Image: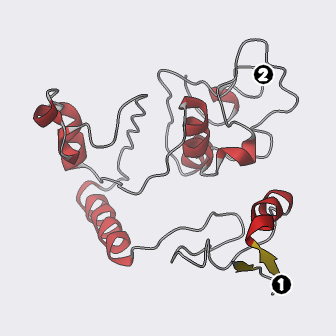
Amino acid sequence: MDFPVKREHKVSGALFALLVMLTPNVCFAQGSVLSKALRTSDSMEPALSFPAQEQAAQKKLEDLRTKTGKRPNIVWLLIDDMGWGDPGVYGGGAAIGAATPNIDRLARDGLMLTSTYSQPTCTPTRSAILTGRLPVRTGLTRPILAGDKITRNPWADETSLAKLLSEAGYATVLSGKWHVREAEGMRPQDVGFDEF
């Protein structure tokens, strides 16, 4: 199978992965010839677009701002070893022997986001969510273990979600597990969190 590249060259399937790793600046119009995912900018991965969902979410946010006069609070819960279908709001909860009434209430009263990208362990999960990028871009593809020699700050070229929210006027707090490096320049307060 051949994959079209922005400059209209063709690359065999066997060399495609190597090309992507060696030329991260190449912008593909689509993520795959088998997918409807589109890359909307050079700095973003290809994604599927759901205009009706995006419009509904935007309306809900606008209605909330009209009603309260302010932006919504954002509560992000990251729980290791829990599937998205485990809380009751997604079909689990009491049905599988562990009711989750508080999580269900937060979800019902808030804006539920259902498009996800899965990572294999905690560190790449946090990296992906905090940067909005694939962990291979930061090098945070596995947990950093005692004795690992860090040769470069994985946050040096990244903008964190916390920094973006702070710049938009939010106060950002992280409570719990960080797990994406603790050296100077890599701690939560060094990459945008107001409090840790």
> Is 73 displayed left or right of 85 in the figure?
right
Residue that extends furthest to the bottom in the rendered view of this protein: 8
Q: Amino acid at mark 1?
A: Arg
Q: Quadrant of the N terminus?
A: bottom right
Instruction: Identify the image's colour scheme: rainbow, by chain, secondary structure or one colour.
Output: secondary structure
- 34 relative to 95, above or below: below
The residue that disc 2 covers is 184
> Is 196 displayed left or right of 146 in the figure?
left
The residue that disc 1 covers is 7
Q: Residue at x 17, y 34 (%)?
A: 93
Residue 40: which quarter of the image? bottom right
Instruction: Give the structural element (helix, strand or loop) at label 2.
Output: loop
The numbered dot on residue 183 is: none
Q: Amino acid at mark 2?
A: Glu
Residue 121: which quarter of the image? top right
Q: Residue at x 77, y 65 (%)?
A: 14
| Residue 65 image offset from top left, x and y in percent | 31, 59
Total label count?
2
Would residue 71 be seen by someone viewing this image from the given angle? yes
Q: Residue at x 71, y 78 (%)?
A: 3
| Residue 107 image offset from top left, x and y in percent | 24, 45
Q: Residues within 10 Å of mark 1 (few under 14, many from 20)?
A: few
Depth-wise, is mark 1 or mark 2 nearer the camera? 1
Q: Residues within 10 Å of mark 2 (few under 14, many from 20)?
A: few
Q: Quadrant of the C terminus?
A: top right
| Residue 182 image offset from top left, x and y in percent | 70, 20
| Residue 29 image offset from top left, x and y in percent | 66, 80
Q: Mark 2 and mark 1 in contact (Cβ < 8 Å)?
A: no
Residue that extends furthest to the top in the rendered view of this protein: 146
Would residue 166 be seen by someone viewing this image from the given angle? no
